[in-house]
Image (cartoon, rainbow, N blue to C red):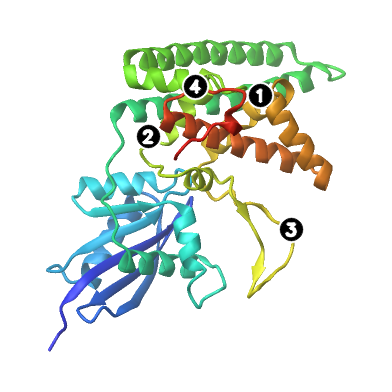
Amino acid sequence: MVKRLLKQVVGIDVAQKELVVSLGKMDEDALSLIYAFKTFSNNQKGFTALVQWVAKQTVEAFPLRYVMEATGVYHESLAYFLVAKAYRVSIVMPNKITNFFKTLETKTITDKSMAEAIALFGLEKKLDDWVQPKKVFRNLRQLTRERDQLTVERTMLKNQLHAEQTEADPSETAIERMKFRTKVINTQLKEIMAETKAIIDDDVEIKRTVELITSIPGIGPLTAAVVIAETNGFELISSKKQLTSYAGLDVKEKESGTSVKGKSKISKRGNRYLRKAMYMPAMAAIRHSERYKAVFVRIVSRNGIKMKACVAVQRKLLEMAYTIYKTKTPYQADYLQIRTTE
């Protein structure tokens, strides 16, 4: 007699170019089993092949759920594809998967072992269905990411222009083209900022959130817009710890069994846009805020690594943004002495 299945889970470890997939199931005796594994391309063709393979490997009559981490941006296209086809999807914060992985007997982290861990996590936990972000957040995210890309292009152009101008025999036509392209990018950046401001001003709730977050030293409207866009207005977030993990600003230690080997470092296993957006605000806060300057000096004096201290300030600024959002209270210099709840 075939046992009834309580759950069927597709655990997906998402990378830029591929999807590493493990299938798991739980029967009526609550026994979990990982029973299939395959890799697919992270594109539309791969998505189609994935769902076809899953259909052949699973039983249609029983519940099926796709589970993946919210790491960076590479999971998004797959999530939209699956939801459009009415599949149940759950997107889990990286720190939850990492903590769950530590409870398993497998200690070697590979793409396959991570996909298996995600599948097991989906089998053992009660997960909510992922809901597509509101259009306003998607629009903000598209604009802020486009701005980031254009800024990178402009920096490259400036470097190329400087190199050409310092040549012994510079090409005047090449210089003019680079200046023209830079001018075009500057115009596009102004357009994007105007569109971003219009979106914020047209939404009362978002405008109020931006006003609250920009009360923090070092954080301006653009950074606030990135934070709101990349977290769907903090809808993805339930704690400060979860937020820093989502941004990839959480500390990761190199472990082997019960011992720790090597220096700790930030995981960078998260949303790079959110992480990048906090860099300049941290530098500004270190220069102009006594509170964050003290944090920076204390960490540098302890280990001598300025970048580590800067990352700590980035993390604290991001956590403060979340706290201020939750309490609806603007930043105050003596915030350390004020009791707040997450």
> Residue at (38%, 56%) from the top-left corner?
68
Label 2, label 3: how far apart the Cα atoms are: 33 Å
Depth-wise, is mark 2 or mark 4 nearer the camera?
4
Depth-wise, is mark 3 or mark 1 nearer the camera?
3
Mark 3 sits on what residue?
Answer: 263
Figure quadrant of the N terminus: bottom left
Depth-wise, is mark 3 or mark 4 nearer the camera?
4
Label 1, label 4: how far apart the Cα atoms are: 34 Å
Foreground: 140 or 174?
Answer: 140
Q: Check disc 1 and report its element: helix, strand or loop.
A: helix
Of the numbered discs 2 and 4, the one sitting upstream in the chain is: 2
Mark 4 sits on what residue?
Answer: 330
Of the numbered discs 1 and 2, the one sitting upstream in the chain is: 1
Of the numbered discs 1 and 4, the one sitting upstream in the chain is: 1
Figure quadrant of the C terminus: top left
Q: Check disc 3 and report its element: helix, strand or loop.
A: loop
Q: Is residue 84 left or right of residue 104?
A: left
What amino acid type is highlighted by mark number 2? Asn
Give the percent coordinates (x, y) of residue 61.
12, 68
Asked if 45 appears above or below 178 in the picture, the reply is below
Mark 1 sits on what residue?
Answer: 155
Foreground: 311 or 61?
Answer: 311
Asked if 286 appears above or below 14 in the picture, the reply is above
What amino acid type is highlighted by mark number 1? Thr
Mark 2 sits on what residue?
Answer: 232
Label 3, label 1: how far apart the Cα atoms are: 32 Å
